[in-house]
Amino acid sequence: MSTVRRTRKQTNFTMSNSDNPSNWTVAELKKKLSDNGININVNLSHSILKRIYVDNVLSVQGQQAAADGDRNQANITNDMQTVDNHDISTMRNSVLYSGAPTPSANLAEGARASNIEVYPEPGIPGGRSSSFTSLPPSSTLPTMATSTVTTSAMSESVILSTLQLCQQAITSLTQSNKTNEAKYSLQTAMSTNAGTPAVNISDVDMVSPELRADILADGSFQEAGTRSRSSVYAVSSFNGSDLDSVVENLWDHSISIRTRNQYKVGLDCYIKFTLLRGLHGSVSDLPPMSEQLLIYFVAFCDDHLRLAYSTIKLYLSGIRYFYLRLKGCNPFQNNAGQNLICLQSVLTGVKKKQSMYAVPKRSRLPITMSILTKMCQLLRSGIFDMFTSYMFEAACTVAFFGFLRCGEFTVLSDSHYDDYVSIQDVICHDSFVALTLRKSKTDPFRNGVQIKLFKTQTDVCPVNAVVKYLKLRSEVFKSQPLPFFVTKEGSILTRAIFIDTLKVILSQLGLNSDLYNGHSFRIGAATTAQEARIEDHLIKTLGRWSSNCYTTYIHTSPSVIQNAQQQIASSVL
């Protein structure tokens, strides 16, 4: 057989142009293949269709003509060598051979002979697994030894081979698109082999080697002192059990006993609410907490318990206090540290709703200087026994001139009281009396507040009233009781006893006693000071007010308003 010169620009086909597959269109190639029993329903390039035709039609025809010495086999081989390298490369990367009808072992040998890299690929569903994806040059492709097979067997073999080639081509394209997607996935990110351990990062000195070793060992770490002293604190070995009682004591002192008791009532109400609604299974533990539960609790207090807005707010404050104390979290703030807006809106709705149907607040009229004078005259007339009259006159004058709240000189109960005014808290001088209050609303840290009451040089004088009471007190009691204000039986003066006695006196004066209470002395002192045209800053000092809320205590009488209007009218003249 003569040697044929091979070039990229010259093709030595002995077939005519109409019989050369390179001159056929894609439609003609598909028709030729269909005529030989190969139906292709997918879009393939011209080069791939031509290669399928050459491998499965012409090569079979060439083998049949080889027995007669035909030269068509050599021409077909030359035609295969002139196929464009780009198309051959495209076909090699796209088509997977499964070994039928071309043996995969011969294909692999051809690939290794042509220095073509072989890549393992997973098996194709429905067919035999392929051992490589790259095809060897056409010169190394083995031909089908089918000289002894019949035409029908050849057609079945050609159809089977073509279908497998098409299926492998489609599967290869699909797998190639998914290769990059599967390269980095959640599974690879969570793999234990992913990443570099911190102990292996030695090139970047972010921290000192000693500190890195301590962190990796999960042990103690060094902390610099005020003078860069080296001190070691073992985090895992910290034990604060001996300080638990101290912390509890500090929590107890953060609020007064009375406030803590009211907070406890609010927490108990919330626990009962959760138990009734089936949300809480144990009384010993704090119930669950969420903004929606708090909204339901507010609605329960408003609709079922008929609680006032101020009481609901007090209960919520109690819930907040105990959750901060026992769980260390503020239930009225979200994770971002912001207030619960929905809860605030519901509370605003409760306030506005109750204001529409609320009963007008009971007014507290002031006990002014004129009323106090009448009260002292009535007490001196013998309406009560001498001890009660002296004690009550001293208490009323001290409350008025000291701008005292009722809870600052009385107690709620004779069995439960704290921080009362004792006999040691009252010191008499020549011109004034020094009274020390152990507790006060404006003294949350219980440092004590000293109030000086001076002589008034009038018939109503707090110094004279206190001196007379102390002298009689020392004569009545051999062993002096510790509280300063006591009854003739020696018991401490409670709020109930004081209010009852006050109402009796006011009723004797012809006044409506229901309009007065223990706070009327503080209101009356501020009102009298304003009528006497005492400067505002002095009124704030006398009443120990830190803001301008003292103006709410001042009751302006109609006569004052009348005089003010007359002065405005006269200024025009």
Image (cartoon, rainbow, N blue to C red):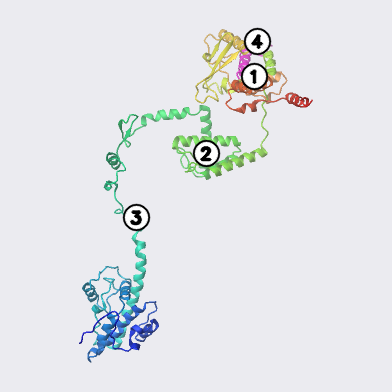
Residue at 36% of width from left, 73% of height from top? 170
Residue 398 lies in the magenta-colored region = yes
Residue at mark 3: 189
Secondary structure under tag 2 reads: helix
Return the mark for residue 345: none
Q: In this rendering, which labeled residue sits more in front, label 3 or label 2? A: 3
Q: Is residue 296 visible?
A: no
Looking at the picture, how far across and down is residue 512, in whole percent? 71, 24
- Looking at this view, is 363 or 46 the one in front? 46
Q: Quadrant of residue 402?
A: top right
The kind of residue on which mark 1 rests is Thr
Of callouts 3 and 2, which one flags the residue occurring earlier in the amino acid sequence? 3
Of callouts 1 and 4, which one flags the residue occurring earlier in the amino acid sequence? 4
Residue at mark 1: 501
The kind of residue on which mark 2 rests is Tyr
Q: How far apart are labels 2 and 4 at the CA level?
A: 56 Å
- Looking at this view, is 68 or 307 the one in front? 68
Circles 2 and 4: CB atoms closer than 8 Å: no
Residue at mark 4: 457
